[in-house]
Image (cartoon, helix red, strand yellow):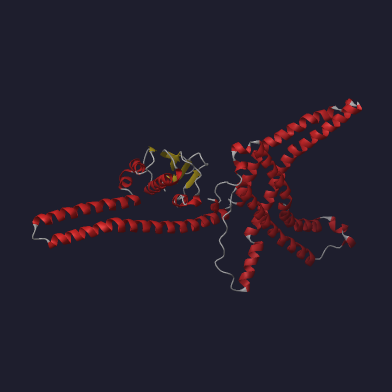
Amino acid sequence: MRAVAAAATAGAPLLGDAEARSPKGRLLGLLHLVTSFALSVGYLVPGTLVLLPVVALVLLVFTGFVDLLPAGEPPSPAALAAFSAVLLTCAPLLGRLACTIQRRRLEDVFGVVESRAPRPAARPRNPAEALLRGLGYLYGRDAWTAVICATLTGVQGVVFGGIVLGLVVYGTALAAGSLVGLGYALVSGSLENAAAPLTAVFLGPVGAVVGLWAVPLLVRLEFEVSRRLLLDAPEMVVRRRLAQVQDSRLRMVDAAEAERRRIERDLHDGAQQRLLVVTMTLSRARARAADPDEVRALIDEARGEAKAVMAELREVARGLHPRALTDHGLDAALPVAAGRCPVPVQVRVDLPERPSARAEGVAYYVVCEALANVAKHAGAESVEVRAERAAAEGADLLRITVTDDGKGGADPDSGTGLYGLWDRVNAVDGALAVDSPAGEGTVLTADIPWEA
């Protein structure tokens, strides 16, 4: 689901609780924070360029700074305006560059991908429109938002990176230097000055250990701040939602077309052929009206074929929306779906009442598709399906959990239908999560609004 800024993949060692606290994870986190500290100098440049004209104007108007200039003459208004225009043009461009670099770092380190903004529908038709679009790019809301985000990102890089550098690097260097000084004091025999180096030898490693202990926490804080600044701003949420809608719309069109072809194939190969047999049998019975016994036998044959047609049509309709789901809810429908799965399935439904019909339909689809994936791809020996009501902020959720003991490693791009599941759940503002480590089975969790 990388296209929608979803799960962390590339940077999992920095985000996972267990791996982040390992020595390797702490060293990676330390390197990340030091890099943030180095980049923070550049991130603070856009904000500095915005402040320079303001500071210069204040110095020229409200202080005696003019007297310090050569010949005591202030710069001309035209020169000051040109200087300010250059700085205020460079600041948004550098702010956008800084935000782009930080988003790339979020992608490379944490695996979080920004949904790209939709391209303009058409190019500007006249120079005036092109000029307005250019001015909007340079001085519009997004440009100044980029300056603010770059400045805040730079401040957090200085703070978090400074803490780590102060504790780990300075503590280690202080301990090493003090150890050298203590050795020199021992060699020279001047032990009366060894108290301070001896104290630093013990305090330096303590500071380094504290800094390494704080690395996972600081990395997580930096990630949350950067994510909220660069990915969770209202305009970014709208863009991400639009990209999700565009992607899911195309996939749902393809899925609807595939479903239409499946129904057409099932009807053509089954019900349609049987109806043709019924028609031909009735024609034969009509042609042999003089022989009542043979007519009766042909009518019985046609009636049997008609019953078979009705059974096949019920099977086709059951794949769309089963009668048991409409009449009795998930308590009755999920065991029926589990019974059609070739893998043994244990169903646990703990619902005090029925959710909305739309939520039930989505949940049933999720379970059916998940069981089909298990049968086709997982190589599992058992499956557990659980349906329960979960409390959440704002409204309750219908939580569907499908757990198997198969080979794991589920990949949305390998034709396992996960994108179709995500589209169906996302259409009702739900959330789909898949935990599928290789060799450890798969846990699929769908949280569907109770009143979807």
Q: Residue at x 71, y 55 (%)?
A: 46
| Whole-percent x, y for residue 171 in the image | 77, 35
Give the residue displayed 77% in from the left and 63% down from the top. 83
* x then y, percent, for residue 142: 62, 58
Residue at (63% x, 45% y) in the render: 223
How many circles with numbers are drawn on the protein? 0
Residue 121 horizontal/vertical position (percent): 54, 66
Closest to the observer, 220 or 265: 265
Asked whether residue 15 is in view, the answer is: yes
Residue visible at 86% across and 29% down in the picture: 183
Name the foreground residue: 430 vs 145: 430
162 displayed left or right of 8:
right
- 400 vs 291, left or right, is right
Q: Quadrant of residue 333?
A: top left
Q: Would residue 229 be visible to someone looking at this image?
A: no
Task: Indicate the quadrant where residue 396 lies.
Answer: top left
Q: Position of residue 268 (x, y in %)?
A: 31, 59
Closer to us: 400 or 234: 400
User: Is 341 located above or below residue 97 in the figure?
Assistant: above
Q: Is residue 248 above or below residue 441?
A: below
In the picture as drawn, the residue positioned furthest to the bottom comes out as 126
